[in-house]
Image: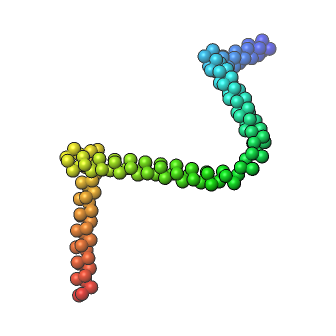
């Protein structure tokens, strides 16, 4: 019986080693992991350098920022309002051009995309209007009676 035990233990160890070997990464996966580690290390180092440079920039330029701060707020406000107005005007213009283009195509029979939905909505509004009108007439008759 003592001889059977080591053979059983060997088969358990070999099956365990086979399971480990089946799950080991191949060389492509190891190379990908190495590349990931290298790129992550480089990005972490660059992040640290960026944060350090930003803090040092604030330390060195803080006196200049404090002295010139009365100028920064009005300039920033004017720039913000100007840029916001320009972007709003451009976006409103783009929406107007798109809407007019769609309307022109629709009325000239070119039927742009989703124009069948407009006809369905128009029909539904008409049907709802008719339903409400009849309902109001019936309700009025009930109120009089």
The vertical placement of 81 against 126, above or below, is above
Left or right position of 13 against 141: right
Q: State which quadrant residue 11 falls in.
A: top right
The residue most toward the right is 2
Q: Is residue 45 visible?
A: yes
Q: Quadrant of the C terminus?
A: bottom left
Q: Is residue 8 visible?
A: no
Residue positioned 68% across, 23% down in the render? 38
The vertical placement of 119 against 24, above or below, is below
Q: Nearer the viewer, residue 123 or 85?
A: 85
Residue positioned 35% across, 51% down in the render? 96
Q: Position of residue 141 (x, y in %)?
A: 22, 83
Q: Position of residue 94 (x, y in %)?
A: 38, 47
Residue positioned 28% across, 57% down in the render? 121
Q: Nearer the viewer, residue 116 or 105?
A: 105
Q: Position of residue 128 (x, y in %)?
A: 27, 65
Q: Nearer the viewer, residue 111 or 119?
A: 111
Q: State which quadrant residue 62 falls in.
A: top right
Q: Quadrant of the N terminus?
A: top right
Q: How many marks?
A: 0
Q: Position of residue 66 (x, y in %)?
A: 75, 50
Residue positioned 46% across, 51% down in the render? 88
């Amino acid at each position: 019986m003592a001889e059977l035990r080591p053979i059983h233990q060997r088969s358990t160890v070999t099956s365990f080693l086979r399971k480990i070997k089946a799950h080991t990464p191949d060389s492509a996966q190891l190379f990908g992991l190495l590349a990931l580690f290298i790129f992550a290390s480089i990005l972490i180092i660059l992040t640290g350098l960026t944060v350090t440079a930003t803090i040092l920039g604030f330390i060195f330029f803080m006196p200049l920022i404090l002295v010139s701060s009365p100028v920064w707020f009005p300039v920033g406000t004017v720039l913000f309002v100007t840029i916001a107005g320009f972007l709003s005007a451009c976006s409103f213009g783009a929406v107007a051009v798109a809407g007019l283009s769609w309307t022109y195509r629709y009325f000239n029979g070119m039927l742009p995309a989703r124009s069948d939905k407009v006809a369905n909505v128009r029909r539904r509004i008409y049907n709802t209007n008719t339903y409400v009108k009849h309902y109001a007439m019936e309700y009025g008759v009930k109120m009089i009676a």
